[in-house]
Image (spheres, rainbow, N blue to C red):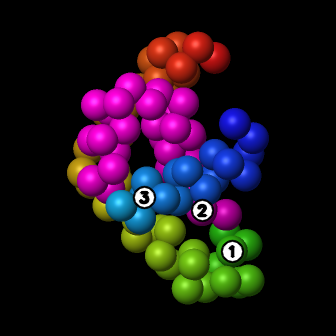
Amino acid sequence: MNAREEELTARALLADPAQVDVYLHQKRWAELAALVRFARRDVPVQLAQTDPALYRQLREQITRFFLRGGDVLSLQRLELLAGK
């Protein structure tokens, strides 16, 4: 998966948090690892100037992800399970 595909996957999962459980059940480790990497990297600050609405939306989604327990997902473990 390239960087753009990872970003799109992460943004889709952030937009629909219920899908995280589905991905866990389906053992889609690479996609979940992409989500964790994206969330931990956080939203680029430059986006606040170029697209404030998208910046605000992503910040809210990432905050909700962590409040719902997203920080318990181990990036190392997900990458290991994904075969990276």
The local secondary structure at tag 2 comes to: loop
Does the segment drawn in magenta span residue 64?
no
Name the side, left or right, on which 34 lies relative to 3.
left
**Where is 84 relative to 73, above or below?**
above
Callout in the foreground (3, 1): 3
Name the side, left or right, on which 8 lies relative to 68.
right
Q: CA distance from mark 3 to mark 1?
A: 17 Å
Q: Is there a contact, CB below 8 Å, between mark 1 and mark 2? A: yes
Callout in the foreground (3, 2): 3
Residue in view at x 75 percent, y 41 percent = 2
Q: Which residue is mark 3?
A: 14
Does the segment drawn in magenta span residue 40?
yes
Q: Amino acid at mark 3?
A: Leu
Q: Is there a contact, CB below 8 Å, between mark 3 and mark 1? A: no
Give the percent coordinates (x, y) of residue 6.
63, 46
Q: Which residue is mark 2?
A: 43
Q: Amino acid at mark 1?
A: Leu
Name the side, left or right, on which 35 lies relative to 44.
left
Mark toward the start of the polypeptide (3 vs 1): 3
Q: Which residue is mark 1?
A: 47
Q: Quadrant of the C terminus?
A: top right
Magenta span: 17-44
Residue in view at x 33 percent, y 50 percent = 19
Q: CA distance from mark 3 to mark 2?
A: 12 Å
The local secondary structure at tag 1 comes to: helix
Name the side, left or right, on which 31 lies relative to 74.
right
The local secondary structure at tag 3 comes to: helix
**Where is 82 relative to 20, above or below?**
above
